[in-house]
């Protein structure tokens, strides 16, 4: 997809949004990235960057549970 096609696609999507909160979020995100052209990882400390990289490299299955397990835990939590 060319840059012009991407721009047009985004314009069409934004034009279809009627939710003020979504539009506000899009405006804030776009404003941030247009005014902060540096790599966001440069804003992190060395330790924070290492932690972020380690988390990104973790297997997807780590610290997860099935939907059934989640429902069981939530049912127990709600009864307390």
Image (tube, rainbow, N blue to C red):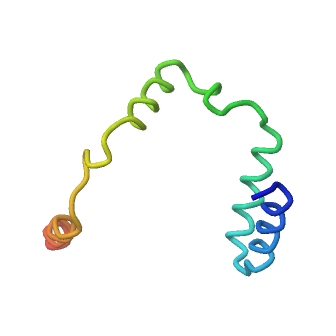
The quadrant the C terminus occupies is bottom left
Q: Is residue 36 left or right of residue 49?
A: right
Residue most extreme to the front:
1
The quadrant the N terminus occupies is bottom right
| Nearer to the camera, 38 or 71 | 38
Residue appearing at x 23%, y 68% in the figure = 67
Image location of residue 22, percent across then percent down:
68, 69
Residue appearing at x 61%, y 29% in the figure = 41
| The quarter of the displayed image where residue 34 is located | top right
| The quarter of the displayed image where residue 79 is located | bottom left
Picture mark count? 0
Image location of residue 18, percent across then percent down:
73, 81
Q: Is residue 20 left or right of residue 80?
A: right
Residue most extreme to the top:
46
Image location of residue 75, percent across then percent down:
16, 73
Does residue 56 sit above or below 63 in this rendering?
above
Does residue 45 sit above or below 4 in this rendering?
above
Q: Is residue 71 left or right of residue 45?
A: left
Residue appearing at x 74%, y 73% in the figure = 13
Residue appearing at x 78%, y 61% in the figure = 6
| Nearer to the camera, 7 or 22 | 7
């Amino acid at each position: 997809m060319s840059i012009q096609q991407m721009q047009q696609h985004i314009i069409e999507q934004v034009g279809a949004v009627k939710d003020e909160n979504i539009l506000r979020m899009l405006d804030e995100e776009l404003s941030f990235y247009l005014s902060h052209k540096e790599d966001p990882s440069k804003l992190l400390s060395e330790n924070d960057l290492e932690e972020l990289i380690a988390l990104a490299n973790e297997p997807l299955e780590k610290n997860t549970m099935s939907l059934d397990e989640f429902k069981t835990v939530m049912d127990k939590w709600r009864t307390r």
